[in-house]
Image (cartoon, rainbow, N blue to C red):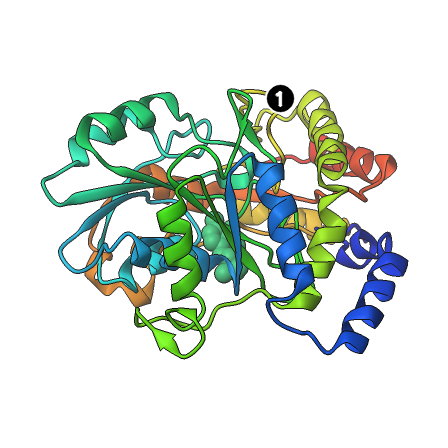
Amino acid sequence: MIKFLDLQAVNARFQDEITARFNAISGSARYLLGEENANFCKHFSAFCGTNYALGCGNGLDALRLIIQAYGFSKGDEIIVPANTYIATILAITENGCTPVFVEPDINTYCIAPDLIEEKISERTKAILVVHLYGQACDMAKIWELAKKYNLKIIEDSAQAHGACYQNKKVGNLGDASGFSFYPGKNLGCFGDGGAVTSNDEELYLKVKAIANYGSHIKYHNIYKGINSRLDEIQAAVLDIKLKYLDEDNAKRRIIAEKYCTSIHNPAIILPQVKDKNSHVWHVFVVRTAKRDALQNYLKEKGIETIIHYPIPPHKQEAYKEYNALSLPITEKIHREVLSLPMSPVMKENEAEFVIETLNNWKAE
Ligand SMILES: *Cc1c(COP(=O)(O)O)cnc(C)c1O
């Protein structure tokens, strides 16, 4: 069987290095906010090109911490693409803010820059962009709008570690960015982990305090904070894997290139790539009107696929207040997308088998 993502093989490559660090941590009895965390944050901010990076508990926390630290709350609106993982929306609503949904560009699946301005109101505080599937959003127009209306740009970079826009890395394309290190992400740890990156010292220090019970100094609590920290074990795994991230992203690009040049099936729509060298292919998403039939066919042939995602946030039961909204492009995407096997350990012959199988598919 061809797995969607062979995580065991992904991490087996670092096993010896990781075991050695685990032993050191175990012996040190320093499990939180120690050297591993400090080292990883230093290296990750350098990787992104930002002045600061703060480790936290997960990607959702990274985003909600940013929104809380900016002081956005009830009555404030945040512009967000309608087609994203639920965490992006939860980060907004957990702070009491209102998500204002914008349709994506049907070709890139990222927020459509031309549809943003009409959604900006007196109450708008920020544009939360999502670099979906591993491709950076088209930022030029978004930068312009943020400046014109004095809005913050928050990035959800959970799917795009290492992706670039105009030679700048994601995480450094706005005012602050949230990352997830969930095991299956391009940079993933051995459980939950996340980070906030920014060039804004004030924001960074505030997020740092809020993530640690609202205190800069132990037992002095200046904010109503939360407990969201990146532990030493996860930081160690990430610090090791970070060294190989660019290389791994390049391997994903090779598989993607193969898919893009060799899948020829009129019933299957391939992803459109703005800049081949800067997409990091967290997932390789194709689209077809007969999505479920294609998924079943591939399953029968031994090819595992995943749908990112089957139900858009505004149609979720948890968001009944938005269920009546009509967002046709978003809804079409959710009906039609399918993610093919993709990882830095995928073998050439596996990719070839996927290609051949797709080319032989007849959509009835
Ligand atoms: C994974 C993901 C998150 C959430 O990250 P967690 O670490 O699971 O909390 C947020 N946004 C997007 C786009 C994601 O893919």
Residue at 75% x, 28% y: name it: 254
- Image coordinates for residue 185, horizontal then vertical, percent: 62, 51
Q: Is residue 86 visible?
A: no
Q: Quadrant of the C terminus?
A: top right
- Image coordinates for residue 145, horizontal then vertical, percent: 25, 27
Give the residue type that dot 1 points to: Lys
Residue at 81% x, 64% y: name it: 21
Relative depth, front residue between 232 and 352: 232
* Disc 1 target residue: 276
Give the quadrant of residue 346: top right
Q: For this view, does 251 lie left or right of residue 77? A: right
Disc 1 under 8 Å from ligand 1? The reply is: no
Work out whether 193 lies above or below 246: below
Q: For this view, does 3 lie left or right of residue 103? A: right
- Image coordinates for residue 235, horizontal then vertical, percent: 67, 60
Relative depth, front residue between 51 and 280: 51
Work out whether 145 lies above or below 305: above
Q: For this view, does 227 lie left or right of residue 14? A: left
Relative depth, front residue between 24 and 106: 24
Give the quadrant of residue 110: top left
